Amino acid sequence: MTIDFALPPVVWSLLAASVILGLGYALWQWHRARVLTRHAAACEEAGVAGGGEPLGVSVIVDGRNEIGELRHCLPHFLHQDYPRFEVIVVAGDQNEAASDTLSEFRAQFDNLKVTFTPRDSRALSPKKLALMLGIKASQYPVVLTTTANCRPSSERWLSLMMSRFEPGVDVVLGYSHYRYSRDRGSGRFYRVFDTVSTGAQWLVSAITGHPYRGTSDNLAYRREVFDAHKGFSELLHLQWGDDDVWVSRIATAANTRVQLARESQLHAHYDHMSHAHSVLKMRRDFTSSLVRRWPRVSQSLASLAAIGHLATAIAAVALQPTSPVVIVAALLSLLLTWPAAIAAVRRQCRVLGAPQLLLSVPLFALWRPVVNCFYSLQERRHRRSNYTIYG
């Protein structure tokens, strides 16, 4: 049997493009995995900073509409192995259930403070108002924001987060993810892939000197930075943006650090994960237009590379369906790309505390741009709800 390598130039071009695009996508995923892995290892080795007087930190817990969660989360926040901290709970209003729960804990812990948001505050973002009230009540130079549906992974959470506040550092970005074990609904594996992809995007950007967002579930900054920027005064027209838009305004390569040690990560509890994931994606899609664009551009280019890799391989085979050279070359192109990309994504999952994904990675990588376009269209339909009456 004679193998004919005399193929039309367009077919060779398509095969070459498939290899180049595929390798580009795989290398991009490996770059993210390498940055995350090395940084997490460095954070683990650094541990808790020693020597000197430890900085005091005020943990601001947004407890609005989360009274039932406070009883479960507060022991985790209050039993931290750190010498100087306070916990400030901002509750929705002074109802009996909230008062009883918080009074019980205040009797046991003298470093617990409680404040309440006013009943009639519809003109402001409820989240920003809660954080501003908590920060106003704080006594320490660093504030660390979180919510009542979050749980620290360990009693070393505060120590690890505060260990990143070296001289000249004003902002420390921590990581938080939903509790994967509680998500049993359809689409749960895609939600894992999407959560890891999103997290890797902004974390790698921050680690490499381009911070542009964080998560208010696990975000620390010096109070003097908050005061210098007049708090959230420039963001009052937005319902959201207290972490991503806010971080994009205060964070720089010089004043920002990322903490990725496993024990520094928080996990959030949601009753309906599918709904929560959709709501959070639409919020992020809205605020992403207000932050630095390059990280989103790199993600889009990588997605286009993955799609182009498969499309060019299919096109080459479609033009020469009987050529064994084309078929073998197209298969080799796929085999060069996807096993490497899968291995890279699995490394990212390990660092970010997510379940390991395997054969679903190629499908999700190709499907994610479509889903993102759907959420973008949904967000545009409901854009007015993202503004306060000042918007």
Image (tube, grey):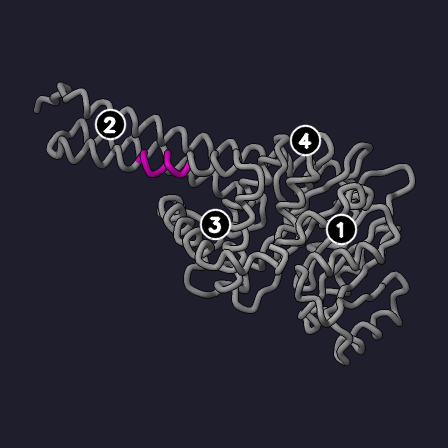
Q: For the point 53% across and 44% down, which residue is it?
A: 289
Q: Which residue is mark 3?
A: 194
Q: Is residue 24 left or right of residue 57?
A: left
* Badge 1 or badge 4: first in the primary sequence: 1
Q: Amino acid at mark 2?
A: Leu
Q: For the point 14% across and 21% down, which residue is it?
A: 7
Q: Which residue is mark 2?
A: 14
Q: Which residue is mark 1?
A: 144
Marks 3 and 2, how far apart at CA: 29 Å
Q: Amino acid at mark 1?
A: Leu
* Badge 2 or badge 4: first in the primary sequence: 2
Q: Magenta stretch: residue 271 in it? A: no
Is the C-beta separation of discs 1 and 2 under 8 Å?
no
Marks 1 and 4, how far apart at CA: 20 Å
Marks 2 and 4, how far apart at CA: 40 Å
Compared with 337, 385 (above or below) is: below
Disc 2 crowd, CA 10 A, few/some/many (<14, 14-19, 20+):
many
Location of the N terminus by quadrant is top left
Disc 1 crowd, CA 10 A, few/some/many (<14, 14-19, 20+):
many
Q: Amino acid at mark 3?
A: Asp
Q: Which residue is mark 4?
A: 253
Where residue 373 appears, as percent x and y from the top left, is 40, 49
Range of the magenta residues?
302-309
Disc 4 crowd, CA 10 A, few/some/many (<14, 14-19, 20+):
some
Marks 3 and 1, how far apart at CA: 26 Å
Q: Amino acid at mark 4?
A: Ala
Main structural element of the magenta stretch: helix, strand or loop? Answer: helix
